[in-house]
Image (cartoon, rainbow, N blue to C red):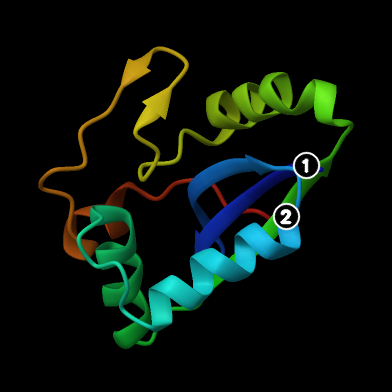
Amino acid sequence: CGVYAVTIDGYVAYVGKSKNMLKTCFGHIARTVNKTPLSRRFYRVLFDAWINKHVVDCKVLETCPESALAEKEKEALLKFDPPLNTRMPNGPRDLGKMTLAKLMPILRKKVK
């Protein structure tokens, strides 16, 4: 169990929580490189990054017990302010017109 980040060139683009981070992260990367489902803006932007030779990766931010997942994810969302998350602690975010060109300049925080 824990909180993870999907990164582009090391910059945090998305933060999520999972009871099985390995399976969840592999799923994100597999959907990105396999172009399915491209109906979701999140995967369309990640696919564009991948085909344009950016490094799309998944990083473990923190492991924690299942009971702490929601709180740890909230902390990571506030810390990294990932632009591809639609559900943020301070309200929803619309990704309707998000593109790789719009995303790259607003990626701010790197994870090691």
* Residue 74: x %, y % from top left: 61, 22
Q: Estimate the x, y position of residue 62 in percent, counting from the top left.
A: 80, 42
Residue 85 screen position, x and y as percent: 40, 38
Image quadrant for the C terminus?
A: bottom right
Residue at the extreme top of the image, as rendered: 90
Residue drawn at x 55%, y 30% is 77
SS for callout 1 = strand
Q: Amino acid at mark 1?
A: Gly
Which disc, if any, is residue 11?
Answer: none
State the residue at coordinates (63%, 32%): 76
SS for callout 2: helix
Considering every residue shown, the one lying at the far right of the view is: 65
Q: Which residue is mark 1?
A: 2
Q: Who comes first in sequence, dot 1 or dot 2?
A: 1
Q: Nearer the viewer, residue 34 or 77?
A: 34
> Which one is nearer the viewer's eye here, 31 or 93?
31
Please name the residue that numbered disc 2 is placed on.
Answer: 21
Pointer 1 and pointer 2: residues touching (CB < 8 Å)?
yes
Q: Quadrant of residue 52?
A: bottom left
Q: Which residue of the protein is positioned furthest toward the left in this rendering?
A: 97
The residue at the point 51 percent across, 72 percent down is 29
Rendered image quadrant of residue 44? bottom left
Alpha-carbon span between mark 1 and mark 2: 7 Å
Mark 2: which amino acid?
Met
